[in-house]
C-alpha cells in the first residue's frame, strides 16, 4: 500500500514539474468511482455497527472510511483538474497518497503494539489494584499486577497474598470470585489470579518428614 502510493506521489510531482496537462473530463471513470463510493458507504455503515465486536471488523471499517475520503477527494480533484486548473489533479493525488501512507502507518503501528503484548495504561492497572485490594478482607497484600494486550483486549494477571493458615477452599473461592469480577470489566479478555502466603517466593526446602518431626516436638 505504501509503495503504490509512493509511486503515485512521485509520478504526480513529475507531472507538475513537467507540466503535463490532462484536461479531459472522463465521465465514465467518474461514474464508476461514484458507484464504488456508494458500495463503500454501505459497507462503512455495516462495519461501523459491528466494529466494537471484532478488531478485524474495526480494521475493515477504517479501510472503508479511508476509501470514502480517497475516492471522494479524488473525484473532486479530477473534476477540478479538467474544469478549473490542470495542476489540481496531480496535487490532489499527492495529498491522497500522503494521507493513505500516514493513515495506514498509524494503524499498523497501533495494531502491532496490540499483537506484541503492549502493556495496559497506568490508569487501568490502578483500577485492577483497587478492585483486588477492596475485594475481600482475607487479602493481605497485592504482590504483582500485570495487564497487557492480546489483540484489542487485555489479559490480566494478579498475585494476591493471603494468610498462611487460610483454608484451601477459602483461598480458592476468593481467588475465583476475584477472577470473575475482573473478567467482567470492559476490554478484559482473560484474568488469572495467583494466591501466595508471602512475597519473597522463596521455595520451601523442608520435607514431609521434617514437618512431622516439628509437629511431634
Image: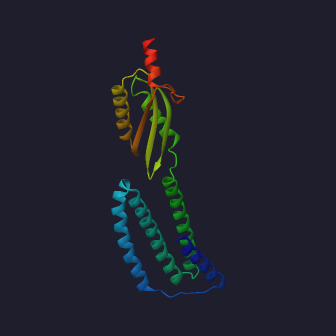
At a point 41% along the width and 64% down the height, the residue shown is 60
Q: Is residue 58 above or below residue 156?
A: below
At a point 52% along the width and 68% down the height, the residue shown is 100
At a point 55% along the width and 70% down the height, the residue shown is 2
Q: Nearer the viewer, residue 211 or 196?
A: 211
Q: Is residue 10 above or below residue 131?
A: below
The answer to which image quadrant residue 137 occupies is top left
Q: What sort of colour scheme is used for the picture?
A: rainbow
The mark tally for this picture is: 0
Please provide percent x and percent y for residue 23.
Answer: 53, 87
Residue farthest toward the top in the current orientation of the protein: 217
At a point 55% along the width and 74% down the height, the residue shown is 5
Q: Is residue 142 above or below residue 214?
A: below
Q: Nearer the viewer, residue 193 or 186?
A: 193
Residue 20 falls left or right of residue 210:
right
Q: Is residue 139 above or below residue 215?
A: below
Please provide percent x and percent y for residue 199.
Answer: 52, 28
Please provide percent x and percent y for residue 83.
Answer: 51, 83
Please provide percent x and percent y for residue 51.
Answer: 37, 57
Amino acid at each position: 500500500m505504501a509503495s503504490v502510493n509512493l509511486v503515485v506521489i512521485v509520478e504526480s510531482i513529475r507531472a507538475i514539474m513537467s507540466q503535463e496537462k490532462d484536461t479531459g473530463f472522463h465521465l465514465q471513470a467518474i461514474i464508476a468511482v461514484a458507484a464504488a463510493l456508494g458500495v463503500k458507504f454501505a459497507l462503512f455503515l455495516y462495519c461501523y455497527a459491528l466494529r466494537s465486536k471484532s478488531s478485524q471488523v474495526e480494521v475493515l471499517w477504517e479501510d472503508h472510511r479511508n476509501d470514502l475520503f480517497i475516492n471522494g477527494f479524488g473525484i473532486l480533484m479530477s473534476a477540478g483538474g479538467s474544469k478549473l486548473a490542470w495542476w489540481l489533479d496531480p496535487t490532489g493525488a499527492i495529498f491522497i497518497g500522503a494521507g493513505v501512507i500516514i493513515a495506514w502507518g498509524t494503524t499498523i503501528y497501533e495494531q502491532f503494539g496490540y499483537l506484541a503484548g503492549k502493556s495496559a495504561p497506568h490508569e487501568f492497572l490502578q483500577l485492577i489494584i483497587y478492585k483486588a485490594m477492596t475485594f475481600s478482607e482475607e487479602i493481605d497484600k497485592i504482590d504483582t499486577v500485570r495487564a497487557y494486550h492480546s489483540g484489542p483486549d487485555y489479559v490480566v494477571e494478579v498475585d494476591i497474598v493471603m494468610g498462611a493458615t487460610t483454608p484451601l477452599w477459602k483461598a480458592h473461592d476468593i481467588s475465583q470470585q476475584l477472577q470473575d469480577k475482573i473478567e467482567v470489566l470492559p476490554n478484559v479478555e482473560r484474568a488469572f489470579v495467583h494466591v501466595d502466603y508471602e512475597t519473597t517466593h522463596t521455595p520451601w526446602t523442608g520435607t514431609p518428614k521434617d514437618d512431622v518431626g516439628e509437629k511431634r516436638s
